[in-house]
Image (tube, grey):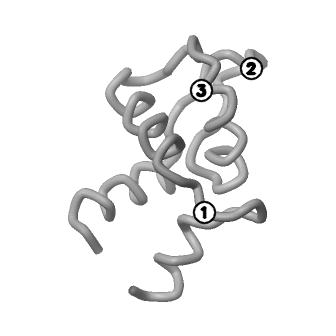
Amino acid sequence: MERATLAACWTAGGPVGPRCIAFLRRVRASGVAYTLVRNVDRDAVIKALAAGFIAWVGRSRDVARLTARGAEYLDRLARVE
C-alpha cells in the first residue's frame, strides 16, 4: 500500500476501524445527508470527523454528509487498494 493510503485510514487515535467504515457506508447509502440515530454512530462519527471523511450539514450536530475524501476512501476499499 502507498503511504497516502495508510495515512488516510488512521487518525490520531488509531485506525478508523470497522464500525467507522460501516458508518461511512450508511452515510453514503443515505444520499445527500445522514441523520445520526444510533449510539454506535456517535462513536464512529468522532473518528470519521478526525479523518476528514464526513462533515456536518449546517449547524446541526445530528446530520452529516460524506466528504470527497470519505467517498474516495470507500471507493479504495471497494477496489481493495
Q: Is residue 29 left or right of residue 13?
A: left
Residue occupying image coordinates x 56% and y 49%: 53
Q: Which mark is residue 15?
A: 1
Tell me where residue 45 sits by quadrant. Answer: top right
- Relative to 76, say whether 41 is above or below: above
In primary-sequence order, the first of circles 2 and 3 is: 3
Disc 1 residue type (three-letter): Pro
Quadrant, the C terminus: bottom left
Using the image as rendered, state which of residue 23 and residue 34 is in the foreground.
23
Callout in the foreground (2, 1):
1
Q: Is residue 76 left or right of residue 19?
A: left
- Relative to 8, say whether 71 is above or below: above
What secondary structure is marked by label 3? helix
Disc 3 residue type (three-letter): Asp
Q: Which mark is residue 43?
A: none
Determine whether label 2 and label 3 are within 8 Å by CB: no
Give residue 75's position: percent from left, percent from top.
30, 57
Give residue 79's position: percent from left, percent from top.
21, 65
Residue occupying image coordinates x 48% and y 34%: 23
Give residue 67's position: percent from left, percent from top.
52, 45
Residue occupying image coordinates x 46% and y 48%: 18
Q: Which mark is residue 61?
A: 2
Disc 2 residue type (three-letter): Arg
Tell me where residue 16 sits by quadrant. Answer: bottom right
Using the image as rendered, state which of residue 65 and residue 20 is in the foreground.
20
